[in-house]
Image (cartoon, rainbow, N blue to C red):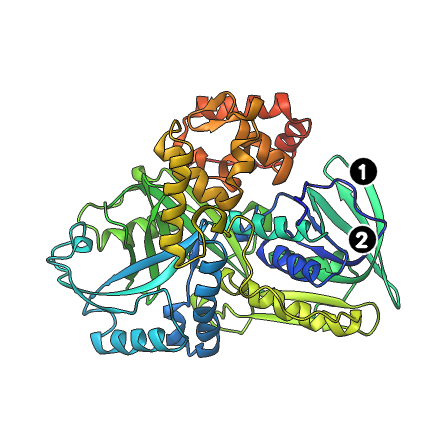
Amino acid sequence: MTEPRPSPEPPAHCDVLVVGGGINGAGIARDLAGRGLRVVLCEKDDLASHTSGASTKLIHGGLRYLEYYEFGLVRKSLAEREVLLKSAPHIMWPLRFVMPHDPGMRPAWMIRIGLFMYDHLARREVLPGSGSIDLRSHAAGKPLQRRFSRGFVYSDGWVDDARLVVLNALDAAARGATVLTRCACIDAKREATQWQLTLREAGGATRRLTARALVNAAGPWAAQFLAEHAHAPKTRALRLVKGSHIVVPRMFEHDHAYIFQNPDKRIIFAIPYEGAFTLIGTTDVEYRGPIGDAKIDEEEIVYLCEQASRYFERPVRRADVHWSYSGVRPLIDDESGNPAAVTRDYSLELDTSAAPLLSVFGGKITTFRKLAEEAADRLSPPLAVAKGAWTEGTFLPGGDLSAWIGPPQRPDTDFERFVQALTKKHPALPEALVRRLARAYGGRVSLVLDAGPAGTLGAEVAPGLFEAELNYLHAHEWARSTDDVLWRRSKLGLHMDAAARARVADWCRSHWPEAASAAAASKETTWS
């Protein structure tokens, strides 16, 4: 397959324009391109710059959804966990979750029944089943208050959500799609057999193209896009719910995550994050402000600190919050009174009364591949596409490690064997750097290691970040600003002080012609 490079030039005509560079839009573009269609994906900001890059970063069935009788959604999500883990073992891996038992919350028998269903609703090959643990002797009990003596443990998965979006866009481009970032679809006029489309780039230049079909995957902007740009009636009500997270210094040393039950019947997670940190979230708050301006409220910070402090021996204090982020989830309005109870399932609306229009409502990151497959299946008849579903069992870019380790065995052990092989090939590189690059790029890591001057990493722009990686991110992964590098393609910003981040910004502005305008146009990452 030809190695893709970001293309600034959209074709004059395509089969499908996909609007929205989140996980659903990127997944749909990938699936359609793999079926032989000419696809253009446009995103008004950067890839994964909104909801899809602000998740709790879990590949999970949704244990708590069982209480709301969402058995179909849970089954579908559980079945997808191992499909996704096998497709990209560098950015996704198994994670064990510990639920301390609080008798004042859900009774033990109810938890056991829920975990039994969680184990058996879908087939498992890699992930171990659930069980009980003695927190007085298990390592997971050490950071908890002494009143917790019993707990339950089960399996789900972790994902680097922003990189998952990028990998889908990379695969779409490798299969012939054109990916346009910082390029908005500002007008879509529907005709009998095609759409007349106007795209506007960040600098203000506009381009026109035609497409046989239009996919509205604008996430929380989906209803707004239909009304204001596609001149189409809104067919599905969306409920916008803000989910916020805080990042604090590491609360525990082991590699398990926690799921905590709260008195309001919600749950929060406390997850190992970026080595030195713990990620705590999420909230569920009705959101009615400008979608792109969502930020954590002080009340949310207090809530997350208080609920985590109900479990940890060492309280989580406001002053501990190192960073925070928020995303707006576009949930299907099922008239549930409690935002936490609103379904996380998705709905696809296909209108073929003229040129096809497919709108995506709702969804969760775990089911993105199934959503994309179903969307492509729905569009195939009106577009006369013969090729069927193909993404299950197919690696995402970097996920195929066989050139380094031979035939795959298990995604978690495969990755560790890959790190060993990479370390052996590059013994002069620091071990932490080798592991980070392996995690980020998987089997594509040689493209990074060879992207500096004379095949070296080049100068170290900031601690652990070299010119070679910056060159690669710009040439191959649509990075155009400092935030693209430090907060979406990586989370290196968490590990740098202000001076180091400024050096990265200076380097980008001096080497990338788009960086200055991108920084001016975007809302830079803010710190708590």
Residue that label 1 marks: 205
Circle 1: residue type: Ala
Q: Is residue 151 left or right of residue 473?
A: left
Q: Position of residue 446 (x, y in %)?
A: 52, 37
Residue 372 appears in the picture as rendered: yes
Q: Earlier in the sequence, mark 1 or mark 2?
A: 2
Q: Residue at coordinates 28% horizontally, 54% vertically from top-left?
A: 256
> Separation of disc 1 and disc 2 at Cα?
14 Å
Q: Position of residue 222 (x, y in %)?
A: 66, 60
Q: Position of residue 232 (x, y in %)?
A: 77, 65
Q: Is residue 165 left or right of residue 42?
A: left
Instruction: Give the class, few, some or many, for how many residues have Cα within 10 Å of label 2's Cα (few <14, many ≥20).
Output: some
Residue 236 appears in the picture as rendered: no
Q: Is residue 18 left or right of residue 64?
A: right
- In the displayed orientation, state which residue is furthest to the right: 192
Secondary structure of the residue carrying numbered label 2: strand
Q: Residue at coordinates 68% horizontally, 60% vertically from top-left?
A: 34
Circle 2: residue type: Asp
Compared to 99, does 313 lie above or below?
Answer: above
Instruction: Give the class, few, some or many, for how many residues have Cα within 10 Å of label 1's Cα (few <14, many ≥20).
Output: few
Residue that label 2 marks: 187
Q: Is residue 258 left or right of residue 121?
A: left
Task: Look at the image and tell me in which quarter the C terminus lies.
Answer: top left
Q: Quadrant of residue 380?
A: bottom right
Compared to 39, does 301 lie above or below?
Answer: above
Q: Residue at coordinates 44% horizontally, 57% vertically from top-left?
A: 408
- Depth check, front residue: 216 or 28: 28
Q: Quadrant of residue 122?
A: bottom left
